[in-house]
Amino acid sequence: DDTERFWIEDASTGIHYQINSESSLTWHQARKSCQQQNAELLSITETHEQAYIGELTKKFSFAFWIGLNTLNFNSGWQWAGGSPFRYLNWAPGNPFSAPGKICGVMNPRQNAKWENQACNQRLGYICKKRKFSSKPDSIPKEELRPIKCTDGWWPYAGYCYSIQREPKTWKDALTSCKRQDGDLASVHNIAEYSFLVSQLDNKPTEELWLGLNDLKAHFYFEWSDGTRVTFTRWQHRHPTYMSGLEDCVVMKGQDGYWATDVCDKQLGYICKKKPSPQSLEKEMIIDPGCQKGWKRYGSHCYLVGSDLVTFSNANKKCEQSKAYLATVETRNEQAFLISLTGLRSEKYFWIGLSDTEEQGTFRWTSGEAPLFTHWNSAMPGKQQGCVAMGTGMNAGLWDVISCQETANFLCKQWAAGIPPPAPPAQVPAAACAEGWDGASQGDSCYKFFVREGNLKKSWFEAEEFCREIGGNLVTINSREEQTLIRRLALDKGVHVQGFWMGLFLLNPDEGFAWIDGSPVIYENWDKDEPNNHEEIEHCAMFNRSPQMHWNDLYCEHLLNWICETRKGMISSLFNWKYQATDDGWIIHEDKQYYFSKEHVPMEQARQICQKNFADLIVIENESKRQFIWKYIKTKERGIFLAVESFFIGLVVSFDHKFR
């Protein structure tokens, strides 16, 4: 039996593991190999599991891919397949911040601890298979019954929630919730998380304590109410321990992602409790300004349909209620709709988006272009159709399906007494900075960066470069923008060069996305593209042709690039700020560095350093190498123009070994 031959079972948990030590695959290829066996790349959520895998791999001297990744650029570290990232076992110095190092390995040489690496490396990998299917939660029937919560508390799926903004430390917040017969909030699935996000104030400064903490066991997160940890949603570069004291978790910002923080900080908090037994409602609660059975969010009312119908029939049903098939204009509105549908048993809910007028150009039924999209993997694809929002494991992800398929639907209308907003005032756009180009009626500026040889950049390096100067890699949202970029390239004579754009498909569970968060509503792929050749092409470029069609390419490929900024942005190339001492030493992390312009022999260079109670630099990791390189590149137009090389503290001995 294949399972017995290739898989090892942990008898205490019933979980099977496959150690692929003779393979050599990229992270994405390794994940596909596991999935083809009805498994997933290894996730580790318990110390027992880490110890078990450490024992299985200790005889190997090379690293293995595991499911650890930060492929979703908006959020932090996560496990492929959706297991919660609640246990941390990083190797010293990891994860370190470097462009493109967004996939995780387990390294037996580091006591089976974890490191972050570039996803394109070819390594062995570990698969994990459970005996049971990991189906998402669905709401028990009794929790669907309407409940009434006391004033200041909101009902959702059988619980009452309250956001309390009086600042308290984590422990005082916990005491306050317990006094109100509750606990600090625990969050167990995408729908519950989405409900809480939809209740936030939509302010970037929002910070609210949750019940998650690692106070009992460092690097092992638990809920204060004792419930199982089944879901996490970390902020970019989190969880992190800058001071070693960040043991409590906050829900932050407009997106409600989670971050570790010092427990003594005074912040608002979210409480959660069971309703009192007598609070089951006999009557359906009617939201103010909405018809019976409709749910209020912001200025609108929403109806979850009760029939499986085609797209056009769904649209008619909404119109009969003086409403329309739902539009989704923000991430928070999307979160609210997930809270309504994510745990439902139906597969799909129609929203009002389609590309039936022109293949690849998506419009709401009102004719407006979307401001937000959230595509599922392989979407929007090349088939014309209508857009439906998924449920369960695909909760909130958008698929393009045949308009003749049947699905449930979501209607939307203005709440009674809310006047539709006035159209936004037209503010005249500022001009583009010197050296940047843009259309007079648009609000974006573009700059083409053409380099020779190894001065070209990988997609990650190009995006970091654009970000450092106040922008992102270019986004194309319409045929007009594509035509403008093509015309600018023709005018400059660079239309056959090949350039990176901001489109990527790194998260295998989602579709193409723009790095600046713009909606994916227009595509201009070359024939037979995107093809993800050999499962390693995850970034998009303008092809080397007069039409500048799009092609997916290996992200580590070196190319020219195009940056985009908003008009009015003061874009200064190389505006990195460095702290310096009075005598000119540059401060980086906890050390000081001196970059000398003098040309001297190595022994003399070392003597100069030692006179200043220092020594020639030792570069012990990638992040320090990048700091040194970036500082020299930053200054090369000025003081270091004539300096071609610098001594470091590495020498070659007679036996040809580096010391």
Image (cartoon, rainbow, N blue to C red):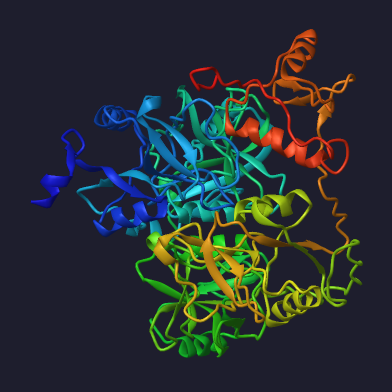
Furthest toward the front, the residue is 654
Q: In the image, residue 435 lies at what x, y percent?
A: 87, 63
Q: Camera-side residue: 20 or 90?
A: 20
Q: Quadrant of residue 332?
A: bottom right
Residue sitting at x 40%, y 39%: 229
Q: Is residue 512 left or right of residue 68?
A: right
Q: In the image, residue 476 lies at what x, y percent?
A: 67, 72
Q: Is residue 145 left or right of residue 239?
A: left
On screen, residue 323 above or below 463:
below
Q: Is residue 319 visible?
A: yes
Q: Is residue 201 visible?
A: no
Residue sitting at x 85%, y 77%: 441
Residue sitting at x 58%, y 74%: 550
Q: In the image, residue 544 lies at what x, y percent?
A: 62, 73
Q: Is residue 441 left or right of residue 224?
A: right
Q: In the image, residue 519 lies at what x, y percent?
A: 62, 69
Q: Camera-side residue: 170 or 360?
A: 360
Q: Camera-side residue: 220 or 167?
A: 220
**Looking at the rendering, in which quadrant would you find the C terminus?**
top right
Q: Camera-side residue: 486 or 410?
A: 486
